[in-house]
Image (cartoon, helix red, strand yellow):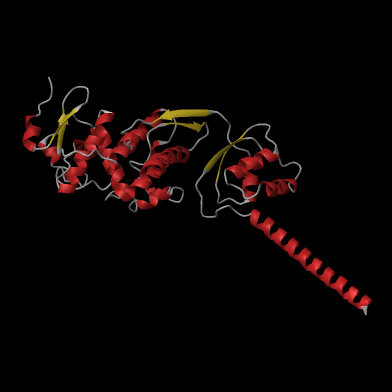
Amino acid sequence: MYKVKSKNKIHTMFYVFFVLLILIIFLSFNYYAKSLEPVSSMDKKPINIDIPSSSSTKNIGEILEKNNLIKNKWIFLLKVKTLDNKAYLKAGNYSLSKSMDLEEILNALIEGGRSGNTISFTIPEGYEIKDIAEKLEKEGLINLDKFLILVSEKENFEGEFSFLKHLDKEQSLEGFLFPSTYEVYENHSEEDIIRKMLEGFEEIYIKDIEKNLKNTDFDLNEIITLASIIEREAKLDKERPTISGVFHNRLKTGMRLQSCATVQYILGERKERLTDEETGINSPFNTYINEGLPPSPIASPGEKSLIAAIRPADVDYLFFRLADEDGSHTFTKTYKEHLNAAPKK
């Protein structure tokens, strides 16, 4: 009787062990298969990484895992071991995304990245898209026509930058190509340059804008539009919040902004003085004849103008006019004071 019980116990233990073994094998294969899949199949935003020369396979796996491009560096190493002996992972710069599965990433690494030679370019604050395009073409960095087509509709990059989803359909990237100094690789594309500038905007958006939007009565497009007007009107950084305060006050009271910068945008040139005919141009961008903000930005605002737009100075001014050659303004509360605020000679 004891032997029968002992034998049954051994059979039970063997059965449990066998079931556990099958379960472990199943879970291991399932985990392996899952690790080969993309980290996020819907996230197509490019992630630029550098693979230094003489990097080991382990180093490459760590770089990929650190940038959240693969799920597990050890599965990456295991997958590399299954490659043909002639397949080498190459050093260089790569533009990858979380939507790529492990095999696609490996194929990219085998094919090779871009060389490390870079070119820098600078986009000044207050540039319009046409100014940006002309500057980049003059520097031999883009094909102007292709660049203008790509930036003409936000849908071209909406899948990579979520903030663009807040803009109107078919809106251009005017105002969202952040002005700064950038580096691109020698064999860059027009898309690479645009992404660089959109990444620059995204950084400021996350840091200064997104969390503060809920404290305003404006949406993202309106804030960037206001910031672009501030950028074109202000000459001195210290005056940006005050100019923003004036515009906020006018918008609250239903006054027209009457910004010369918006008319200059329509004209396509920057003029010191505007004629009555020019300030009467029939255009949704003309803030002399329309209340509220223009439908979209008129230039690329810098960080200080962006912050000023979302954090205006607490002032009761409604007017400002150029006061001196240094770009300073005189701020006033009434139209009579505004008329009497003659520029310094």
Most foreground residue, 10 or 305: 10
Most foreground residue, 33 or 177: 33
Q: Is residue 339 left or right of residue 316?
A: left
Most foreground residue, 254 or 152: 254
| Residue in the picture at 15% in, 31% down | 321
Q: Quadrant of residue 204 in the image?
A: top left
| Residue 122 shows in this picture | yes
Q: Is residue 31 left or right of residue 181?
A: right
| Residue 302 shows in this picture | no
| Residue in the picture at 67% in, 38% down | 59
Measured as percent of width and height from the top left, residue 136 is found at 40, 31
Q: Look at the picture and state if 219 lies above or below 2.
A: above
| Residue in the picture at 46% in, 28% down | 120
Q: Look at the picture and state if 296 lies above or below 42.
A: above
Q: Quadrant of the N terminus?
A: bottom right
Measured as percent of width and height from the top left, residue 270 is found at 23, 31
Q: Quadrant of the C terminus?
A: top left
Q: Residue furthest bottom?
A: 1
Q: Quadrant of residue 224 in the image?
A: top left
Measured as percent of width and height from the top left, residue 30 is found at 68, 60
Q: Residue furthest top?
A: 345
Measured as percent of width and height from the top left, residue 329 is found at 18, 29
